Image (tube, rainbow, N blue to C red):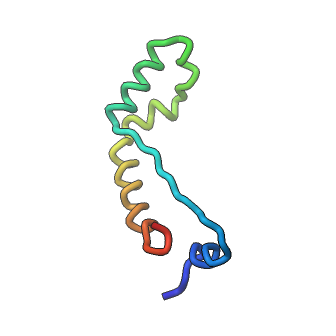
Amino acid sequence: MKKSGWSTKRSHGILLRKYWFSVSDAVQEERFRRRLQDPTRRWKLSPVDLESITRWETYSRAKDEMFVHTDISEAP
């Protein structure tokens, strides 16, 4: 098995941490709803944000698939 770049960097004293922050679809919908209702927060919404609501399940499956391939012993 070929060693990943992670192993090489780690052997040189570099510590790399991966973080993934995620919220549920219900929490995200609530955030969007509040932004739509509050004129002082509406600027935070873009057409892309509103479109993403319809793709939440697709994005979630893609995220899970990404973790299958990136959550490895060399880079947990």
Which residue occupies 36% across, 57% down? 64
Q: Tell me the quarter of the picture where residue 26 sits.
A: top left
Where's the C terminus, which quadrant?
A: bottom left
Residue 1 to residue 69: above or below: below
Which residue occupies 48% across, 88% down? 1
From the viewer's perspective, is 31 left or right of 4?
left
Residue 11, image x, y percentages? 62, 78
Which residue occupies 43% across, 74% down? 73
From the viewer's perspective, is 6 left or right of 51?
right
Query: 38 or 17: which is nearer to us?
Result: 17
Query: 29 or 21: which is nearer to us?
Result: 21
Residue 44, image x, y percentages? 56, 25
Residue 33, image x, y percentages? 40, 21
Q: Tell me the quarter of the picture where residue 32 sits.
A: top left
Q: Residue furthest bottom?
A: 1
Residue 69 to residue 53: above or below: below
Q: Tell me the quarter of the picture where residue 34 sits.
A: top left
From the viewer's perspective, is 50 left or right of 40?
left
Q: Residue furthest right?
A: 12
Residue 70, image x, y percentages? 46, 66
Which residue occupies 56% across, 13% down? 40
- Count of all numbered marks drawn on residues in the image: 0
From the viewer's perspective, is 55 left or right of 49?
left
Residue 7 to residue 56: above or below: below
Query: 8 or 14: which is nearer to us?
Result: 14
